Image (spheres, rainbow, N blue to C red):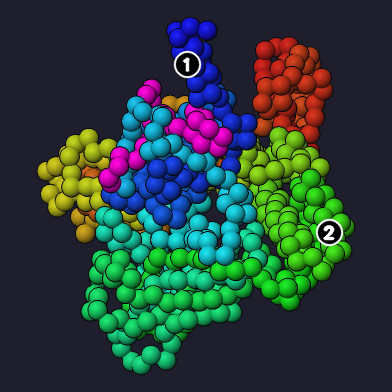
Amino acid sequence: MNIFSRILFLITIFISCTNKLHAQLKDGIYYLKNSATSMYLGGANTNGTQASLIKYGQPIYLIKKSDNTFALDTKMFSSSTSHYLGTNLYMDSEIAYWTFTEISEGTYALSCEENKYLAYDGNSTTLTTTDNYNSNASQWKVISEEERLSSLKAGSDATFIIRDANFSKNMGPAYGQSYWTVGNVANPSDLIISSGNSTNNCASAYHTTFDTYQILKNIPNGTYTLNVQGFYRLDAGRAAYIPEFYVDEELETFLPSTNGESTVNDACTSFTLDMYNTKIVFNVLDGRVTIGTRLEKNMNIWCCWDNMRLTYTKELDQNLNEKAYELSMNAAKEAQELYMNKDIKQKLDSWIDHKYVAESCYDSLDSYIRRLNKLTGDAFDSADIYENVKNHYNMCDSLDESGKQIFKELAADIYASYTEQTITNGIREIETLDSLYNVAYLQQTTPGTDMTKVIVNPTIDGSTGWITEIPNGGNGPLLNNTSFEYWGGGSLDEEERSFNYYQTVNGLQNGKYTVTCEAYNSMNNVEYGFSKSSGIYATSGGITVKTYVDEDSETLKEYTTPEIHVTDGTLTFGVRNFNTMVARWFVADNFKLTLAESDVTSIVEVNSHSNQVIKKIYSLDGVERSKMSKGINIIKYSNGTTKKVYIK
């Protein structure tokens, strides 16, 4: 083989190797470890959200796309859709998909744009991109959470087990939700899980009781050490109660402030200097432990805490391991009784039946317990999913009979999956149930049914959902995040001012509706034009109904429009002035929509079409049927008319 053939052969082999995806890389939780630094991908530096190298690692949720690229879900939120590693190298960006090119088994180069590989620049912990994928700086060991847990040994750092151990910005399992559960809070606005400066955050509580905690599940049994920093400042009274860190029943109190901290930024600085370290040593015997912070009764304390660090100190000795076996078996048998995915239950049942015989063999007993705890944790998680799906399915109990029937018909497949115990993570099922509930909600037929759910922001908490028009000037609206207000001023006889505050709802079932809101119209004793000034209105199909707010008052009172007949599924409603005599001070709040009469024909009324031949029968979602079924049927007659027919 000549030199050129050998070079071509080597290039071919290299391309083949560097463009394959490892078979084991799939959806799941991973940690990305940089080959050049042995540090992990995480959020840090500017705003705590830049893609950076961090010591302890941040869990990354890989979401596989059909073309074998992956989104990196970081769970660091700037909005409900921005929690991914983006091409801008921020961890709270809109979704982007990365190509994982395998360099060696389990090690990859990550690129989101051609020849742009995620990399360490050799200096800063802030990451960059490079066109050199063959450098250790741009190569990442992709480690599953299970692999990392199983690799723990005496002295190993285990901080990655704690979600958001640094109380980072907007980190949690979902938008607006922290990994830390909060309870026993006297003043919720005074407990802040994450605040600080542009590069470092911590948790703080000011003059309030609290209990913030996190349950760690499916972790190896053993002895652990928790190091955490925290201080308190007593602002009045005596320190009968001071905040404490706890791990199950083990606890240590916060240290008193000794550095004159007066702001959260001061606290972040002190924590960076490791000034308030507290240590708790504890045993995990059943793969679960609760860690947290709390303050009971005392309302005169300001405190801050940060930087939880967990170390796996050693394995359990044989006596504790045997006790752990007993506890784990009890928990597993408790989980056996729950309703869950049948495959998970089968694995748990099988492992319990398998039992552990050679209890004298320490290593085997430890391995058995680890497996048992993992299956037990999976069982509890699956049971939570099934309970959540059941609760979303049971939302239909709040619907009338027609809505229930429609919902149950549309959700039949999901209900079958629930009863057959084949649901896995439940996300798709819950989202589908919620959307089906909205469909069924709109198809209720009982007069008097509250349809307010279709109104966006009916309590006017901010302006979301509403459109504001001031065609001829004026001094409003004054949107104070709790109601709509319009201030018309004093010279009402000289000004031509107007306002219109409204929204449009589409997809309504045809029928008659009323719109209600609370309002007042303060004219300050200006008499003229008052009774025909401003009020609540509803418009559909070119017809408008209205009710004047005709009482000179500054107290909210309920007003309701006459019935409006919706014939095209669309309704516009709101408050406005109906002539040039605008209100001096008009306020509206708390809108409500009520179904007065449905256009859906009951089965009794079908006889009125007995002289007509039924040509076609359709379900609500447009699927042709051979005969009428329970729920709403769309009937097309020989004379061209169409009716909705509801059968109980």
Residue 476: horizontal and vertical position, in percent?
A: 22, 47
- Which amino acid type is shown beneath numbered disc 1? Ile
- Is residue 108 in the magenta section? yes
* Residue shown at 22% from the left, 43% from the top: 581
Does residue 290 appear in the picture of this structure? no
The label number, if any, that marks residue 352 in the structure image: 2
Decide: is 456 above or below 293. Answer: above
Residue 382: horizontal and vertical position, in percent?
A: 70, 51
Q: Is residue 464 left or right of residue 442?
A: left
* Residue shown at 39% from the left, 57% from the top: 168
Residue 200: horizontal and vertical position, in percent?
A: 31, 59
Which callout, 1 or 2, points at the residue further toward the start of the chain? 1
Q: Is residue 81 left or right of residue 484?
A: right
The label number, if any, that marks residue 11 in the structure image: 1
Q: Is residue 13 left or right of residue 40?
A: right
* Residue shown at 30% from the left, 42% from the top: 122
- Is disc 1 in contact with disc 2, using a CB cutoff of under 8 Å? no
Alpha-carbon neighbours of circle 2 within 10 Å: few (<14), some, or many (≥20)?
some
Q: Nearer the viewer, mark 1 or mark 2?
A: 1
- Which amino acid type is shown beneath numbered disc 2? Ile
Residue 25: horizontal and vertical position, in percent?
A: 59, 35
Residue at far front of view: 2
The secondary structure type at the circle numbered 1 is: helix
- C-alpha span from label 1 to label 2: 53 Å
Alpha-carbon neighbours of circle 1 within 10 Å: few (<14), some, or many (≥20)?
few
What span is colored magenta in the figure?
100-124
Q: Main secondary structure of the magenta part?
A: strand
* Residue shown at 44% from the left, 42% from the top: 35
Decide: is 267 above or below 257. Answer: above
